[in-house]
Image (cartoon, rainbow, N blue to C red):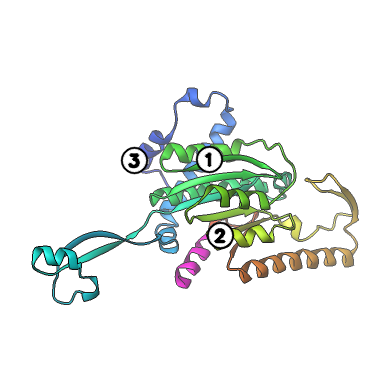
Amino acid sequence: MFKTLTQPFRDWFQDSTPEPEQDKNLSPELLQRIRTIQVKTNYLVNDIMAGEYVSAFKGRGMEFSEVREYQPGDDVRLIDWNVTARMNQPFIKEFKEERELTLMLLVDVSSSGGFGSAEKLKNEVSAEIASILAFAAIKNNDKIGLIVFSDKIEHTIPPKKGKAHIWNIIRTILNFKPEGKGTNLSLPLEYLLNIQKRKATAFLISDFQDDGYEAKLKLAKQKHDLVAISITDPREETLPDVGLIQLEDAETGETLLVDTHDKEMTTQYARQFQQIRDKRKTYFSSIGIDTIEIHTNRSLTDPIIRYFKMREKKH
């Protein structure tokens, strides 16, 4: 499935792996999962998404670099009059793009993420997406921070750089055992507003099974560059024809007996799900928030790459 690893990447991977005693509390199975995601996502970032991230997410603007002698054709508006007066000949200011960004990952670990009818659970997909974004950011020397939430703030990692930091983020997402079951999207948005004073790019990764978070969403969008990543399993969109089944809400524990032979009911269920998703996406768009739709049974990278390309054209 993956290309043969080149020696530079083998060296990188070995350098990025912490000493065994640091991971003495992790099972061999979990360590293998973490290493697999590291290999896979680094391959995806290097071989598939190269350049897309940096093109889509620009720096904070232009910062002063240096002054140099004026040359014919230079913009006279950039003349530094103080230096020009001291040197008795014209000098201009040069600027460069301030490339470094802060990327914040807001990852939903509520109980509904434990559902999955395809190869992966929704929370496994969330972890892989977060890893892809983290690798893309670290490759471009950006800082990455993490907010893990359910119906409470479960865990946070302040924005930093470095390979060991990436390892810590991936390990935290994959190994995290949440205390809360439900989803409260207002909490991570409010927390982001409180801790992140400078503008950041924030990815909110969730299945969005919550209500009443619109006010915090608007406030977060006004201060930060906010992107929603919506995770959906195919069985949430349509019900298979398997007769009587009992559905249980993973977050509330409520159960419902459903007759999947009933065509009218299953059609209405599918229509209702689509309407809720479309309404949410339309609302997000109305306040300037883009949505990336991810399905657990489809490619994870294709929607992200499409979004990066679309964003580059828009900006």
Q: Residue at x 13, y 76 (%)?
A: 72
Q: What residue is pinned by disc 1?
A: 157
Residue 306: in magenta span:
yes
Q: Main secondary structure of the magenta part?
A: helix
In screen coordinates, is 32 left or right of 243? Answer: left
Q: What residue is pinned by disc 3?
A: 7
Q: Residue at x 54, y 23 (%)?
A: 24
In screen coordinates, is 290 left or right of 267? Answer: left
Q: Secondary structure at mark 3?
A: helix
Sequence-first disc among 1 and 3:
3
Instruction: Give coordinates of residue 47: x percent, y percent.
Output: 42, 54
Q: Which mark is residue 226?
A: 2
In screen coordinates, is 13 left or right of 180? Answer: left
Q: Residue at x 68, y 61 (%)?
A: 214
Location of residue 9 (image quadrant): top left
User: CB under 8 Å between callouts 2 and 3?
Assistant: no
